[in-house]
Structures are given as C-alpha cells and as structure tokens.
Image: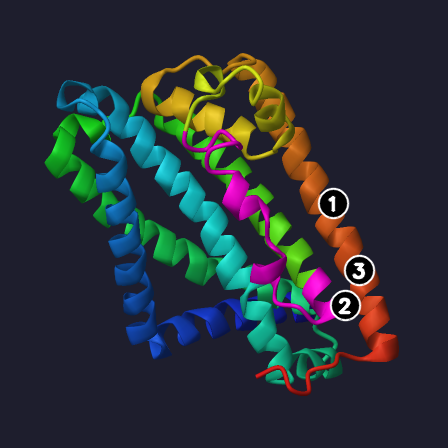
Amino acid sequence: MMRNDIRIRAIIWLHFLRLWRYKFSFLNNILTTILWLTIFVLGALMFIPSSKWGEMAPIALWGIIMWQFLSSSVWYIGGWTWFFISQGLVEEHLLTNTSPVPVLVGRAITGLSVTLAASLLVALVFTGLAGASVLIVYNPLIVLVGLVLLATMTISYALLLSAASFRIGIPGTILDIANFISFVLGGLAVPIANLPEQIRPIALAIPYAHPAEIVRYGVRGLEPYLGLANELIISTIFALALALSARIVFKRTMKYIRKHGVKAVGRM
C-alpha cells in the first residue's frame, strides 16, 4: 500500500512538472483552443437574434465546456499515448512494476487545466456578448455532479482509445469518432428535447447526453428529457460501465504487452 501511494504521488508530481516545463506549449494550447472556440461561437451566434442571446448563451457556453471535457480527454490521454509509447516509457514503467494506466489517467491534470483556463476565457467572451447573467448557475452542486460523471466517462473513453492504440499501433485521436458526433447528436450542445424526434434515440444511446442533461438542469433549471432522478441513475450506470470496461480492456492489454511487447519503431 505504501509503495502504491509513493507511485501515485510520483505520477502526480510528474504531470505537474511536465505542465510547468512545457508551460509555453500549455499556453499555446489554451490560446489555440480559445481562438477556434471563439470563431465557432461567433459563427453560431450570427444566426441567433440578439434578443435571445441571454437565453441561449448559457446553454451554448456550457455545451462548449462539456465538449471541451471530451476533446481534452481524447487529445491529452488518448493522443498522448502515441508519445508515451514512442519514447519507450511503457517499458520503463513496466520494469518498475508500475502500470501505465495511472500515468495515462494523470494526463487528466493537463487536460483539465487546459479545459478550465479555456472555459474561463470563453466565458469572458460570452459575458461581453450576453451580459454577466450568463455566468449565473441555478444549482452549482448539480452542475458539479454532472461534470464529475462526464469526466469519468470521457477519461474512461480515452483509456479505451489508449488501449486500442497499444494493440494496433494507431493514435487514439485517429480512432476517435465520438468526439465528432457527440457535440450535436450526443446532446452536448442542444438539449435532447430540442433535437429532432428522429435523432433523440441516437442521443439517448450516447452516454455523454445524460450528464449533459444534468449539467443543464444545474445551470438553468431545464428539466432533463428523462427526468433528473432517471438521468442521475442512467449517468451513474454509464460512468461505472465505461470505467469498468476501461479497467478490463487495459488489464488484458497489459497482459498482451508483457508477453508480446509494444511496437514503437517508426512511430515518430
């Protein structure tokens, strides 16, 4: 137990140290994220009458924040696996009897840092467009619960991409498809009730839609499509199922790697 605690502290320190050493890259990621998010936001608001900005802006803002949760997990965990393998870090950790899983989960420190900083700056843009009321939250605790459930799902999904990358040698970002369809079809940007009736079953089948409904309830008191209690239960089940799937898949992947190794030649 003591040795595991030391490993966990070392992994956390590793990622904070990397965050500091690559601070200019960190700032560049934030600014790049802000630029393309701002372009997207301004383009979307062009089609919304200014009289409705106050109503729509909070929903759009939190939709972008939630999508950024998903994107950062894919890029900073699933995508970073490519670097992790190429530098021979998998073998180094296995030689010290340290599973790569905690190391990859620790990348959430970087991803969440970028998400937090970018979200704050995007919120400033929304405040300038729609006023300070865009920052008012109906129930902060419900918002926090929704974000924790969403983060659990997105990190688990990123670990599944990492496991696939270990096995077949393709970057997790290339394997990702949910990132492209979840923003609209997955109910991150738009409440499920506002989606066309034909698309609603698709949104309900995508795990991220359910914590998104919880977050929107916490932000503006919008009643979830299936009701708050049902969404809390469904979101918890999806989060646990994804986390368990990631654990099982990675356990099998590590067993495969210990036997066959990791092919990293020519990756960079």
Q: Is residue 116 left or right of residue 145?
A: left
Q: How many marks?
A: 3
- Say if the magenta span includes residue 171: yes
* Highlighted magenta segment, given as a residue range: 164-189
In the rendered image, the quadrant that contains the C terminus is bottom right
Label at residue 244 = 1
Using the image, determine if residue 132 lies above or below residue 107. above
Q: Looking at the image, which is closer to me, 197 or 114? A: 197
Q: Is residue 69 visible?
A: yes
Task: Measure how far apart labels 2 and 3 are at the Cα level.
Answer: 12 Å
- Classify residue 150 as left or right of residue 255: left
Q: Which badge, 3 or 1, is on the more N-terminal residue?
A: 1
Residue at the spot of label 3 = 251
Work out whether 111 lies above or below 190: below
Secondary element under disc 1, as helix, strand or loop, is: helix
Residue at (42, 54) in percent of width and height: 112
**Contact, mark 3 vs mark 1 (Cβ under 8 Å):** no
Q: Position of residue 126 (x, y in %)?
A: 19, 37
| Position of residue 38 in the picture relative to residue 113 (left or right) | left
| Amino acid beneath label 2 | Arg
- Can you say whether 202 is above or below 106 in the image? above
